[in-house]
Image (spheres, rainbow, N blue to C red):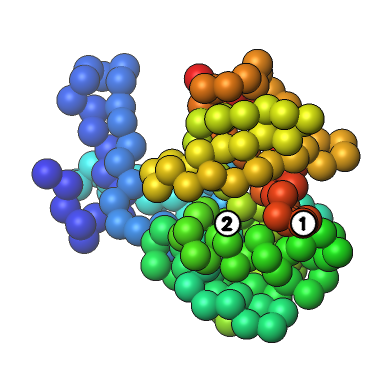
Amino acid sequence: HSNPTIPNEVDCSGGASTCVIRVNGAVNVLAGTNDLVIDFELKDSEIEINSSSCTVTFKVTPLHAKPHDKEEEIEGVITALNNGTFELRGEHGMTFTVDYSQVSQQGIGIENLLVFAREKQLKVEVECSSINMNQAHCTASEIEVEVKGVVADTTNNVYTIQLDPDGSAIKIELEQGGEIEGNITSETEVEAELVGEVNGVYMASEIEQES
């Protein structure tokens, strides 16, 4: 058992030529940090060795990473829907306020899609053009709603899907530039990423055959 009061511990029980360094204690990453990388050259490291307890302490200096242009993604289920915003509860219980007034799907029924997602408690994936972790606020640039089910009909490039697990049916059409993966026919199990709703038909960015 390692002693939690010892910052680092070296175990050479495997033989004189083999040692294991155990890092005891926590490595804390503050909210809002995108990436954490711990990298060092052993021969160039500044270390302190305590021969009596066989411990080695590495002196670590933080490097501040440059900001990323990559957008952040959050996912969860909608718990409240308001005019221009909704509350998204993630799988770990954290709830974000999502501003969807600037999403790229405006004009293809994003409101109806969000109502549908809340009603069915479907997983919602949100790309955030900006995110504030301290205030749990996301400005969305793109929203997709995931559905799974079995194809019941494929007439005129409109797919009728019986949803898991309740069995209700919806009609799905692939949006321009969307992707189909697999051989989608009747009785095929599929997963679709919905981006809007037009005249009772849900638009999908992707329809994929489930393996």
Mark 1 falls on what kind of element? Answer: loop
Image disc number at residue 124: 2
Q: Residue 22, how many percent across, how many down? A: 30, 41
Above or below, 82 against 201 in this view is below
154 vs 132: above or below:
above
Q: Residue at x 30, y 20 (%)?
A: 18
Residue 104 x %, y %: 84, 60
Q: Secondary structure at mark 2?
A: strand
Judge left or right: residue 191 versus residue 20.
Answer: right
- Res. 182 mark: none
Residue pointed to by mark 1: 199
Observer able to see residue 177: yes
Identify residue type, mark 2: Val
Q: Residue at x 72, y 29 (%)?
A: 155
The structure residue drawn at horizontal position 87% and vertical position 36%, both measured from the top left corner, is: 177
Bin the neighbour count of mark 2 within 10 Å (Cα to Cα): few under 14, some 14-19, many 20 and up: many
Vertical order, 11 against 32 (above or below): above
For the image shown, how many numbered marks are present on the structure?
Answer: 2
**Cα gap from disc 2 to disc 1, whole angstroms:** 21 Å
Give the mark, 2 or 1, whose residue is nearer the N terminus.
2
Q: Quick check: can you spot residue 179?
A: no
Q: Quadrant of residue 180?
A: top right
